[in-house]
Image: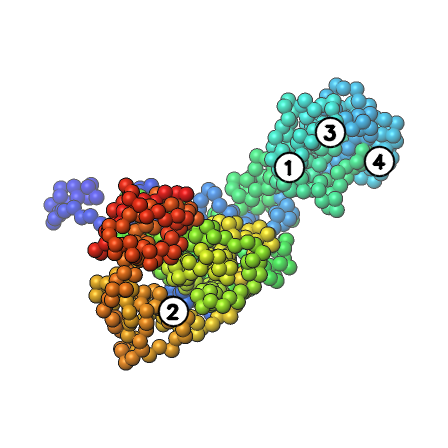
């Protein structure tokens, strides 16, 4: 540009010059400028009407969550589908399996067997033979010293002679043997039996016995005890010895050299048992695990017996440094291919788009159609469920769907949860450069993985973006896990014997108390709603329902049942245990670690070892009337508490009566309302249904009872400050300021001692805490018994 400006100025043709900044593409990773070129590429014609219509119709069968994605983002993409550029010009990747001949004719190769078919071959046939029985074989000894005079036994010579007769039909041209004494003797017997001249026998060091180091001259049993045949030990060598992988490398180098050196020969390889096995494994390109599986599977492979021979099929194949089959670059391009007429074939330079790999996953992961064909053609396809972020509507969701259509198999998944992106608290994309990235490990350490998991589920619908604000995480942690573990801690103070629990945690109990009935009805409601929503792949609703249930369990059921449980009410204790154990099952898919912890602390001897091995709970009777009536009672309590707050009268101060609209609630609900609002009577009249009116006339008796309740609260606070737990019994020293206080204590003495856990009450002067309650004063000292 500078040279152009100079030229125009020199010729007097420059009208104006100025700087102009414009956007320019840069690499998102290294931030360097990019230059775009038009390049040739390989395409799949997705716009073909039959393919396009198939994808659209199959999409209608998929259950999308959120549902609008089906016709919205994903549906629009399918309706406007473009042809798919499936090739890339990169070094690494799945090579495009297209080979070209001179003149442009192309061949697409679809399997390893087909690749071997076109591989340029020597025309050699290979037979591998193990030496005949030798002296060390009888004793089970290991001998890896080539100079050790271990000879064939008489039986071994006979075995070898018999095998030589069988080999005459193979028209052996050449014998190549290990230089060990026993293999030399074996090869010589075979050479003589086949009538071959001495120059037709060669010895190669690479065919020797595997050296097992310090185990040489010991037994093979001793070696295998310390080196069992595992994939790890395949690469591990004993001290002073060699690994299976090393021996396999020698054997494969050896046979590869034969391919280059000889043409159209029938070659007999005389070696030892281990090297013979590894030669065959290597010829298949097997991994360590596949090589070991050969000798485990007695039906498909038999370890060579002494003097036994078999043909080994070898053709050059793409492999890595361990001679394991590897179809990627550069290995694939190191193998020479030719057609039926000997004309060379060259692979095209491109590799496949990685998204084509991802789309082929349902078939490729099971090596379809070469293996597991019945599975994929049956229940193995389509998948029941898949979940990824919303950007995969044009990524993995699409490529899976596209490959399914191209394969004539339709949709690749039945249900999909499409997730929104995680943003910072202000709704901005997280970025290191912006400094707004949240360290997940720090949050996990602070709140636990289950809290973060539940936050993801409950903050909004799955498909919506989620603004990560730590305050909301802390709030969820408090509302779910803190409440839940407080309930558990209380239960552990007053557990119930296993034999007294309901139905070993399976059958719904049938208690008599309305609070027990209510929490069990809520539990059934939770089971039914969670199951329904999870079957529909909805996560928000069940998690919020779990949160609400825990709130009900803690702030209503346990608070209202606390004294019953303390007092040993078996129904209350058993109900609480049953609710917690069942809740662990419901929480297991959403908060697996907390659910497991809960389960381990609650399980019966007949329960499964883990909550994740237990069955989904069966719901009991969901009594909607109990739930409705309890909601009505709680609503009246809420209105009454607001009225108390407005009047400035604390709940501990008893009142004579409240006025409500007519109630259709039984006596047990009215008793709960009276206890919660601390009133003696409920009067039903024509009061507005959304209002509760208090009788604020506080009689001397009511005021006296209010002071008594405040005294209990104050003493409980002293117990807590002293670090005492509910089961601790105390000696209570109490000094009253006057006769009015003494009369109060005398009136409520028995109830007072029980409420504060006092084993003894001493009415005496003390150096304790001064308590001022209304116009009364007490000095109180609490000591553990």
Which circle's residue, 4 or 2, is located before the other in the chain? 4
Q: Secondary structure at mark 2?
A: helix
Direction from residue 381 to residue 738 in the image, left or right: left
520 or 318: which is nearer to us? 520
Mark 1 and mark 3: span between their CA atoms?
A: 16 Å
Q: Are marks 1 and 2 in contact (CB under 8 Å)?
A: no
- Mark 1 residue crowding within 10 angstroms, few (<14) / some (14–19) / many (20+): few
Mark 3 and mark 4: span between their CA atoms?
A: 26 Å
Residue at 67% from the left image edge and 42% from the top image edge: 293
Q: Which residue is mark 1?
A: 230
Mark 1 and mark 2: span between their CA atoms?
A: 71 Å
- Mark 2 residue crowding within 10 angstroms, few (<14) / some (14–19) / many (20+): some
Q: Which residue is mark 3?
A: 220
Mark 4 and mark 2: span between their CA atoms?
A: 99 Å
Numbered badge on residue 140: none
Residue at 77% from the left image edge and 37% from the top image edge: 304
Q: Which residue is mark 2?
A: 671
* Way the structure is coloured: rainbow
469 or 56: which is nearer to us? 469
- Mark 4 residue crowding within 10 angstroms, few (<14) / some (14–19) / many (20+): some
Mark 2 and mark 3: span between their CA atoms?
A: 83 Å
- In this rendering, the answer to whether 679 lies above or below 195 is below
Q: Secondary structure at mark 1?
A: loop
Which circle's residue, 1 or 3, is located before the other in the chain? 3
- In this rendering, the answer to whether 65 lies above or below 428 is below
Q: Which residue is mark 4?
A: 163
Residue at 22% from the left image edge and 49% from the top image edge: 22
User: Could you tell me if residue 28 is visible in this image?
Assistant: no
* Residue 210 image position (x, y, % from top left): 69, 28
């Amino acid at each position: 540009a500078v040279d152009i400006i100079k030229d125009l100025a020199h010729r007097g043709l420059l009208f104006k010059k100025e700087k102009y900044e414009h956007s320019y593409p840069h690499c998102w990773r290294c931030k360097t400028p990019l230059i775009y070129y038009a390049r040739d590429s390989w395409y799949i014609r997705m716009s073909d009407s039959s393919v396009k219509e198939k994808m659209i119709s199959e999409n209608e069968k998929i259950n999308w969550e959120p549902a609008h994605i089906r016709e919205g983002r994903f549906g629009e993409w399918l309706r406007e589908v473009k042809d798919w550029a499936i090739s890339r010009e990169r070094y690494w990747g799945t090579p495009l399996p297209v080979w070209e001949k001179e003149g442009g004719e192309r061949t697409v190769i679809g399997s390893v067997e087909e690749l071997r078919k076109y591989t340029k071959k020597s025309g050699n046939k290979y037979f591998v033979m193990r030496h005949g029985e030798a002296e060390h074989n009888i004793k089970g000894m290991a001998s890896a010293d080539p100079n050790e005079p271990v000879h064939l036994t008489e039986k071994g010579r006979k075995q070898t002679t018999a095998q030589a007769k069988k080999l005459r039909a193979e028209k052996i041209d050449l014998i190549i043997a290990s230089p060990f004494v026993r293999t030399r003797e074996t090869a010589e017997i075979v050479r003589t039996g086949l009538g071959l001249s001495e120059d037709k026998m060669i010895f190669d060091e690479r065919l020797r016995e595997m050296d097992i180091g310090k185990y040489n001259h010991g037994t093979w049993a001793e070696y295998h005890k310390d080196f069992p045949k595992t994939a790890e030990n395949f690469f591990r060598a004993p001290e002073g010895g060699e690994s299976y992988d090393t021996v396999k490398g020698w054997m494969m180098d050896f046979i590869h050299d034969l391919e280059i050196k000889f043409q159209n020969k029938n070659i007999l390889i005389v070696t030892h048992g281990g090297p013979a096995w590894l030669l065959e494994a290597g010829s298949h390109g097997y991994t360590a695990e596949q090589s070991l599986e050969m000798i485990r599977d007695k039906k498909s492979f038999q370890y060579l017996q002494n003097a036994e021979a078999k043909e080994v099929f070898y053709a050059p194949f793409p492999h890595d440094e361990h001679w394991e089959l590897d179809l990627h670059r550069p290995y694939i391009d190191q193998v020479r291919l030719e057609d039926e007429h000997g004309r060379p074939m060259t692979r095209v330079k491109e590799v496949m788009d990685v998204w084509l790999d991802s789309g082929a996953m349902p078939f490729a992961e099971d090596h379809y159609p070469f293996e597991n064909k019945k599975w994929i053609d049956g229940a193995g396809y389509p998948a029941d469920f898949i979940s990824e972020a919303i950007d995969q509507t044009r990524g993995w969701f699409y490529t899976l769907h596209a490959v399914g259509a191209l394969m004539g198999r339709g949709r690749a998944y039945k249900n999909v949860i499409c997730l929104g992106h995680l943003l910072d608290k202000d709704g901005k994309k997280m970025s290191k450069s912006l400094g707004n990235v949240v360290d997940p490990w720090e949050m996990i350490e602070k709140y636990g993985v289950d809290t973060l998991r539940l936050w993801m589920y409950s903050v909004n619908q799955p498909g919506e973006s989620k603004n990560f604000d730590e305050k909301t995480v802390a709030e969820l942690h408090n509302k779910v896990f803190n409440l839940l573990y407080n309930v558990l801690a209380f239960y552990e103070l007053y557990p119930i014997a296993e034999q007294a629990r309901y139905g070993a945690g399976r059958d719904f109990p049938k208690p008599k108390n309305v609070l027990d009935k209510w929490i069990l009805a809520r539990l059934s409601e939770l089971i039914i709603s969670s199951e329904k929503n999870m079957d529909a792949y909805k996560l928000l609703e069940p998690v919020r329902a779990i949160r609400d249930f825990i709130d009900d369990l803690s702030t209503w059921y346990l608070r209202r049942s606390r004294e019953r449980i303390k007092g040993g009410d078996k129904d209350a204790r058993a109900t609480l245990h049953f609710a917690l154990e069942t809740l662990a099952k419901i929480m297991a898919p959403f908060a697996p670690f907390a659910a497991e912890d809960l389960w381990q602390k609650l399980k019966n001897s007949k329960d499964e070892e883990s909550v994740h091995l237990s069955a989904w709970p069966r719901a009991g009777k969901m009594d909607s009337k109990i739930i409705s009536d309890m909601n009505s009672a709680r609503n009246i309590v809420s209105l009454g508490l607001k009225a108390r707050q407005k009047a400035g009268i604390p709940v501990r101060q008893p009142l004579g009566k409240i006025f409500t609209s007519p109630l259709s609630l039984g006596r047990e609900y009215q008793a709960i309302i009276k206890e919660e609002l601390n009133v003696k009577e409920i009067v039903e009249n024509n009061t507005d249904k959304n209002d509760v009116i208090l009788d604020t006339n506080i009689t001397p008796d009511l005021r006296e009872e209010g002071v008594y309740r405040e005294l209990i609260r104050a003493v409980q606070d002293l117990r807590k400050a002293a670090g005492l737990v509910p089961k601790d019994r105390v000696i209570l020293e109490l000094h009253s300021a006057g006769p009015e206080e003494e009369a109060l204590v005398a009136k409520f003495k028995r109830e007072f001692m029980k409420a504060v856990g006092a084993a003894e009450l001493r009415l005496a002067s003390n150096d304790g805490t001064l308590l001022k309650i209304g116009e009364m004063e007490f000095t109180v000292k609490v000591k553990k018994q």
